[in-house]
Image (cartoon, rainbow, N blue to C red):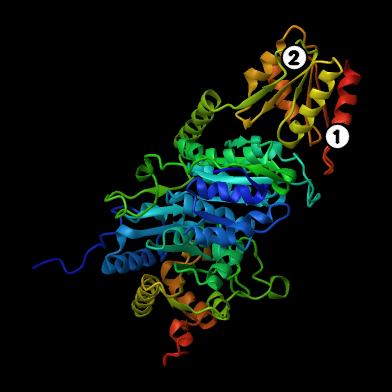
Amino acid sequence: MGKIFKKPDCLADQVTHYCPGCTHGVAHRLIAEVIDELGIAGKTVGIAPVGCAVMAYNYFTFDFQEAAHGRAPAMATGIKRVRPDLVVFTYQGDGDLASIGMGEIIHAANRGEKFTTIFINNAVYGMTGGQMAPTTMPGQRTTTSPFGRDVEDVGMPIKVAELLSALQTPAYIARQSVIKPKYIVKAKKAIKTAFMYQLERRCFSFVELVSTCPTNWGLTPVEAVIWAEEKLLSYYPTGEYKSPLQAEGGDNAT
Amino acid sequence: MGKILMKGNEAIGEAAIRAGCLNYFAYPITPQSEVSEYLSHRMPEAGGVFLQGESEVAVGYMVFGAAACGERVFTTSSSPGISLMSEAISYIAGAQCPAVFVNIMRGGPGLGGILPSQADYFQATKGGGHGDYRLLVMAPASVQEAVEMVMTAFPLAEKYRNPVMILGDGLIGQMMEPVEFPEHLKAEPSNKDDWATNGMDTRKSTKKNIVKSLFLDPVVLNQNNLTLKEKYNRMKREDVMWESYNTDDEYKLLIVSYGTMSRVCKTAVDNMKEEGIEVGMIRPKTLFPFPEKAVFEAASKNSCKMVLSIEMSMGQMVEDVERCIHGKRPVEWYGSCGGDVPTPEEIMDVVKSYL
């Protein structure tokens, strides 16, 4: 009997530096599975962010560039413009994409750059030690909001998928989650759809993945999943927010 | 091909295309916007990429992304824009990618003004961004030389896998001069498959390439910095460029000046020669690597009593001049950087005041 479950070929044989209970590993695996299934590792360039996934280039077997904080969409733009035949994706966290890199992601999306962004939203800065992010929930305690996020002072958490969907340029924008198997199946489908649209050179594609950060939330991995499902998914609902089919007059517009 | 009359900024854009660079990203800023305006139609015509980015910050990384794929790429900007690109320049230098940046300098600090200046000498030659890196910096003194330097810049960037900067000023960008374009550059054999993220299929390899500037291990980071240092030392050995002017005669004073300022100084030197006053001049064409030996030797001439650094800044290059003369001759500075270029008469008065 042959192997029925194995590590994706384009996931490197490496122990990761991620914390126990972190969902980066799940997100990495889904991307690797999709790239394997599409057979595109040889023409893929990933872009690692600044944040916990800064060393993502160690965990995949294809070409990678490492961006400065928030600048991955600009680098992806540079690659896709000069080498439209390459498949390019950015992998970015919420501090990277929704704070310092908000300008780059909005303009790349609005230009309709033909690359894919995987956006990891875990409501906190991970790498730097659990500071408040633009996605931190109201009242959520972090190392820079020790009394809980005060929305009177710093505003409400940013819903990036919704924000990008407001742009008039056609795009594929989805939010899924990687906290439980029932969400993971849908997350993989969204990631695959995003890469397919890129391969068809159709539009910018974006998948937000609601994730956990037990270490910086001060919770066990199991508690973190419960908290994410209760608190994050009610504020950050999953679904397909925008599809190029809408602009093309298709019937599955949401 | 004969000479044509062309504005500096447009000639710079055309020179890049003739150097085989078909990728250009930029953000508008005075006094260099004509490069973008020119390339917005000329690049597509040549089958290349033109994109106006949302900021100089983003443009710096568009250049980085393209450069990391091993493609020839360049951008142009002016002083405040170069400040914003300096983050990317540091990353590109750290990750060892070739790219060309053109700075058509205007007055600073802050918004400063839009008239010609040379006040970004420190930024260009001593860093600008963070970390231990250098740019190979070339300073043209005419539209013709700007063209030649742009065309030289790409092979040099590739030779060193390091960003090269063309440091012009607003006058070089804005003035029209007759220009003759050299032959198109021939494509050199490239070793980019060794390092570029151009896709494994492209280079028929199963080994991934990673372009990065993060080295958390202190030993490895130190080694990367030693590698960079060796490249900068090699630039000093192999690619120093300068012009000596009127240095055969017995001059009492040596001028060191570059770019637009050096043209005014040349006129002053010629005028004084007619009056029987000999003044020598060294014009650095590369600001990094600085022509240390040439300046030292010209200053060491027995007849030479002092050295005068004349620049459109409040005294930046003068520090390099002092450094390479080792105290052997007194070094003085003269200049201005409000946007008005000093006149030959002004330079002559200053020189005479020292004689």
Marker disc for residue B343 = 1
Q: Secondary structure at mark 1?
A: loop
Instruction: Say which quadrant the C terminus of chain B sits in.
Output: top right
Label tally: 2
Q: Nearer the viewer, residue A90 or B238?
A: B238
User: Does residue A225 appear anywhere in the picture?
Assistant: yes
What's the residue at 50%, 68% (across, down)? A122
B291 shown above or below B147: above
Image mark 2: chain: B
- Residue at the disc numbered 2: B327
- Residue closest to the far bottom: A251
Please determine whether, in this image, residue B8 is positioned above or below residue A21.
Answer: above
Residue beneath the point at 72% across and 40% down: B120
Can you give x and y, in whole percent of width and height, for residue A21 in the image?
A: 40, 64
Say if labels 2 and 1 share a chain. yes
Q: Position of residue B309 (x, y in %)?
A: 77, 26
The amino acid type of the residue labelled 1 equals Thr
Q: Residue furthest top?
A: B302
Structural crowding at the residue carrying mark 2, measured as other residues with C-alpha within 10 Å and reported as few (<14), some (14–19) or many (≥20)? few
User: Answer yes or no: do the residues labelled 2 and 1 have beta carbons within 8 Å?
Assistant: no
* Chain for numbered disc 1: B
Front-most of A119 and A145? A119
Q: Is residue B52 above or below residue A160?
A: above
Residue B304 drawn at (x, y percent): 77, 11
Figure quadrant of residue B50: bottom right
In front of the other: label 2 or label 1?
1
Residue B354 is left or right of residue A101, and the answer is right
Q: Does dot 2 land on a helix, a strand or a loop?
A: loop
Residue A129, percent from left and from top: 55, 56
* Residue sitting at x 85%, y 14%: B276
